[in-house]
Image (cartoon, helix red, strand yellow):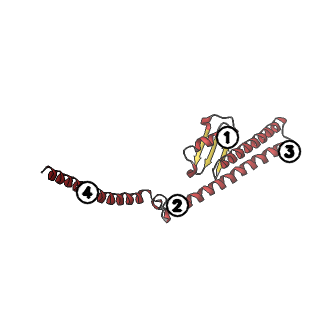
Amino acid sequence: MKIQKRHIVLAALVLALGAAVFINWQFSDSGASLIHEASKELGAATYVNADTSTDDEVANVSKQTTKAEEYFAKATTERQQAYDTAVETAKETLELADSSDEAKTQAVQQLNKLEDNLVIQSNIESLLKGKGFSECLCLISEDSCTVCVIKEELVDDAPLIIKDAVLSQMDIDFNSITIIDV
């Protein structure tokens, strides 16, 4: 009898083991397909990189880009006109025979300062364009500097890059540098 009981217990264990393997196989297939489907949804490139923007959003982005380009073009033109006017005024002061030596000295100093500022502004703009900014505009006043850049280009470390470029060309306080997004 002991032999029969052993055979019955062994057969029951083999059947239980077979049932467990079968159930595991059934659940692992459906589980794998669920995992596979979920991975399609979560990590699929079409979902991650898909262009879900509507035509209105694309139009808004192009309008913003156009506005930024217009702003930079207009501001550059206005800045150049202001410099031309200042240079003309200084030259007229130098050419006038009635002008005193003091007025001529001030005119020369103004011309030198304008020239220095123009060179510094140009250098800062070139540095920033070299560091990845597509458009930028630098405006220098007596004790401060304002830099205008495109809003989308102001990422995490952009303010530090801008301030570093300004400080490499000018001797001003770190807090005197203003960054404006367009």
- Location of residue 96 in the rendering, given as x and y in whole percent from the top left corner: 85, 44
Asked where in the image residue 66 lies, by quadrant, the reply is bottom right
Farthest residue toward the right? 97
Residue at figure coordinates x 66%, y 55% from the top left: 73
**Residue beneath disc 2:** 60
The CA span between labels 1 and 4 is 85 Å
**Residue beneath disc 4:** 18
Mark 3 surroundings: few (<14), some (14-19) or many (≥20) residues within 10 A: few
Front: mark 3 or 2: 2
Residue 141 tag number: 1
Q: The residue under label 1 is which amino acid type?
A: Ser
Which comes before the other along the chain, label 3 or label 4?
A: 4
Which comes before the other along the chain, label 2 or label 1?
A: 2
- Location of residue 78 in the rendering, given as x and y in whole percent from the top left corner: 68, 52
The CA span between labels 3 and 4 is 108 Å
Disc 2, SS: helix
Front: mark 3 or 1: 1
**Residue beneath disc 3:** 95
Q: The residue under label 4 is which amino acid type?
A: Gly
Which comes before the other along the chain, label 2 or label 4?
A: 4
Disc 4, SS: helix
The CA span between labels 2 and 4 is 63 Å
Q: The residue under label 2 is which amino acid type?
A: Asn
Disc 1, SS: loop
Front: mark 3 or 4: 4
Disc 3, SS: helix
Asked where in the image residue 97 lies, by quadrant, the reply is top right
Mark 4 surroundings: few (<14), some (14-19) or many (≥20) residues within 10 A: few
The CA span between labels 3 and 1 is 27 Å
Task: From the viewer's side, name the closer residue of 125 and 80.
Answer: 125
Residue at figure coordinates x 56%, y 57% from the top left: 64
Mark 1 surroundings: few (<14), some (14-19) or many (≥20) residues within 10 A: few
